[in-house]
Image (cartoon, grey):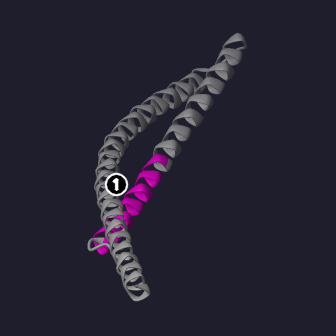
Amino acid sequence: MSFRFESILRLNKNKEDLLQKDLGQINALIQKQQDSQSFMKDIMESKKEELNQKKRQAVDVQTMILYDNFFRGTQVHKQRQEAIISEITVKLEEKRGEVVEAMRKRRTLEILKDRDMLKEKKLKEKKDLAIQDENAANLWGRQF
């Protein structure tokens, strides 16, 4: 009892596994970028607090310029991170669609396989029953 599309089913399963692996890598990349963004946000908050402390004391212009440059740089970095996350999210959605399609194809073949196996099982049972009927008829014929 072998399914005639078994090799295609295996290929589809392997393709689905590879796509899911890619999806996991994309998810990990998004998480890494979000962690980086969160880290920069925490640093920026820390530096804002530090600047507020320095403002209460006497602070020179060079220090203010330095903090200003830092905040501008972190703002540029934040915008870049948001663009990267947005691009990766688009790729994630595309890959998710590919995974869903691969799962659908695999599941369709599995359903066909199940139906084929059930059909073969019923055919075998029918043949076995016919053989048993023939044996019983022969046995009955020998007795009389």
Q: Measured from the top left, where is residue 18 in percent x and y?
A: 39, 63
Question: Which residue is nearer to you in this view: 104 or 127?
Answer: 127
For the residue carrying disc 1, how many other residues have a C-alpha within 10 Å: few (<14), some (14-19), or many (20+)? some
Q: Is residue 11 magenta?
A: yes
Helix, strand or loop at mark 1:
helix
State the image quarter where residue 112 is shown: bottom left
Query: Dividing the image into 4 quarters, which one contains the N terminus?
Result: bottom left
What amino acid is labelled 1 in the image? Arg
Magenta: main secondary structure: helix
Query: Dividing the image into 4 quarters, which one contains the C terminus?
Result: bottom left
> Label 1: which residue?
107
Q: Residue at x 37, y 59 (%)?
A: 16
Q: Residue at x 58, y 27 (%)?
A: 44
Left or right: 92 with respect to 50?
A: left
Identify the residue at the far front of this view.
Answer: 144
Q: Measured from the top left, where is residue 92 in percent x and y?
A: 36, 45
Q: Is residue 98 magenta?
A: no
Question: Which residue is nearer to you in this view: 6 or 62?
Answer: 6
Above or below, 71 relative to 27: above
Left or right: 133 with respect to 54?
A: left
Q: Measured from the top left, where is residue 3 in percent x and y?
A: 31, 72
Q: Which residues are magenta?
A: 6-27
Marks counted in the figure total 1
Above or below, 23 relative to 72: below
Q: Residue at x 31, y 40 (%)?
A: 90
Question: Which residue is nearer to you in this view: 108 or 103?
Answer: 108
Identify the residue at the far bottom of this view.
Answer: 142
Question: Which residue is nearer to you in this view: 34 or 66?
Answer: 34
State the image quarter where residue 2 is shown: bottom left
Q: Residue at x 46, y 33 (%)?
A: 73
